[in-house]
Image (cartoon, helix red, strand yellow):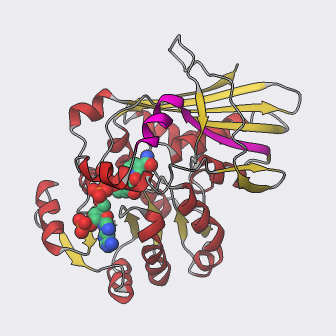
């Protein structure tokens, strides 16, 4: 199997190249700058890997490279700025597509606008294949399946402040400053900003205060869970840090998060489901090294699209893979997960 990694010269892209190699999958490094791609191939331990230049305005070149691969993993963010040409090229080439976007707006747009084109090309397009997007969507699906009527779902990213890459900081600029969307009354609207009750994360004793945030789950979960309302939140202390993020600050952040900082930080996705009779089910997924896990998730999702198959169209993670089976797979990368009653 061969995957094209678009944006392979970046921090996440090079982790995806390394993970593909570890899994015995041949990575083809694609992007706008051959020298940076070649250096990334050497650093990832695949100096002889194929490297192909194709800028975002070179649709034909991009599609031609993609057509020689089985799937595309797009790691070139911010995706609200650069994502669309890569999606279009994958559709033109008829190759499955995943990306590592954390930007709610991009994920919502791809799911809303590219479903028919992906179906016509008989491929699956799965945006938001990351350490928050995938575990959150999958565990919310499993928690919601425990009740007959889903009144509301809270999807919360409960990680503590930790190291982020410059690429993440640049992409977060598109997200911070707005509370994002909520799903209510059968459609998406600007989040009401209503306060949340604090949550005590599993294994912790202190409740975490929450603030509404534009998480991917708000635009993915209602596509497979018939919920009355879905909102997204992060810890207030993390939201407060984001408010200080400016373009100037983002450019001072190092490109790479060192391994020690990656290992020290735990990511934690929480899904709280309230049923029609007031019953409460929670699901959570946690683990170390969110960036490493994003690479594991992106490569495994691409592999499953190719080797296991999924419906054609623009899909959320829970529509593309078997939720429980995929979460079980993630335990091999250090994740733990649970669904249960409150
Ligand atoms: N949990 C999450 O939500 C999560 C987790 C991991 C990653 N991500 C997302 O993944 C993305 C990548 O993050 P990162 O830290 O890897 O960023 P990065 O190191 O800055 O890498 C960005 C990549 O995109 C390419 N690129 C940027 N602008 C381009 C353009 N105009 N044309 C062609 N290529 C372009 C860069 O190519 P050059 O080398 O040529 O500049 C580079 O390969 C971000 O959006 C980040 O938020 C999200």
In the rendered structure, which segment of residues is drawn in magenta? 228-244
| Residue 233 magenta-highlighted | yes
Farthest-out residue, right: 277
Question: Where in the figure is residue 9, as x and y percent of width and height?
Answer: 23, 63
Question: Where in the figure is residue 230, as x and y percent of width and height?
Answer: 72, 43
> Dividing the image into four equal quarters, which quarter contains ligand 1?
bottom left
Report which quarter residue 24 is drawn in.
bottom left
Instruction: Classify 165 as above or below 279.
Output: below
Report the front residue among 220 and 208: 208
Q: Residue at x 78, y 45 (%)?
A: 227
Farthest-out residue, top: 205
148 vs 54, left or right, is right
Instruction: Classify 316 as above or below 70.
Output: above
| Residue 52 magenta-highlighted | no
326 vs 273, left or right, is left
83 vs 66, left or right, is right
Question: Where in the figure is residue 5, as x and y percent of width and height?
Answer: 32, 65
Farthest-out residue, bottom: 60
Number of numbered tags placed on the structure image:
0
Q: Residue at x 48, y 65 (%)?
A: 80
Q: Is residue 7 visible?
A: no
The N terminus: image quadrant: bottom left
Report which quarter residue 207 is drawn in.
top right
Q: Is residue 31 visible?
A: yes
Report the front residue among 159 and 122: 159
Q: Residue at x 72, y 27 (%)?
A: 281
148 vs 258, left or right, is right
Question: Where in the figure is residue 162, as x and y percent of width and height?
Answer: 35, 33
The C terminus: image quadrant: top right
């Amino acid at each position: 199997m061969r995957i094209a990694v678009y944006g392979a010269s970046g921090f996440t892209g090079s982790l995806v190249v390394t993970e593909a190699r570890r899994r015995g999958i041949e990575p083809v490094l694609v992007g706008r700058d051959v020298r940076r791609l070649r250096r990334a191939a050497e650093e990832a331990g695949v100096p002889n890997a194929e490297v192909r230049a194709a800028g975002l305005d070179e649709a034909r070149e991009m599609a031609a490279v993609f057509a020689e691969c089985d799937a595309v993993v797009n790691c070139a963010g911010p995706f609200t700025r650069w994502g669309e040409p890569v999606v279009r090229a994958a559709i033109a080439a008829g190759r499955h597509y995943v990306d590592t976007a954390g930007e709610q707006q991009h994920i919502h747009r791809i799911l809303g606008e590219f479903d028919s084109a992906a179906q016509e090309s008989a491929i699956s397009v799965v945006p938001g294949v990351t350490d928050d997007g995938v575990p959150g969507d999958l565990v919310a699906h499993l928690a919601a399946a425990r009740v007959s009527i889903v009144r509301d779902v809270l999807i919360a990213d409960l990680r503590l402040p930790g190291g982020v890459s410059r690429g993440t900081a640049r992409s977060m600029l598109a997200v911070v400053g707005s509370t994002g969307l909520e799903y209510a009354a059968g459609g998406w609207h600007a989040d009401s900003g209503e306060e949340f009750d604090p949550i005590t994360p599993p294994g912790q004793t202190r409740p975490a205060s929450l603030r509404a945030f534009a998480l991917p789950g708000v635009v993915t979960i209602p596509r497979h869970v018939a919920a009355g309302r879905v909102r997204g939140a992060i810890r207030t202390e993390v939201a407060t840090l984001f408010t200080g993020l400016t373009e100037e600050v983002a450019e001072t952040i190092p490109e790479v998060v060192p391994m020690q900082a990656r290992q020290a930080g735990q990511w934690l996705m929480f899904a709280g489901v309230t049923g029609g009779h007031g019953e409460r089910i929670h699901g959570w997924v946690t683990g170390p090294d969110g960036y490493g896990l994003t690479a594991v998730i992106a490569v495994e999702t691409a592999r499953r699209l190719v080797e296991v198959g999924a419906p054609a169209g623009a899909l959320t993670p829970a529509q593309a893979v078997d939720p429980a089976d995929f979460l079980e797979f993630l335990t091999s990368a250090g994740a733990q997960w649970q669904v249960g009653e409150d």
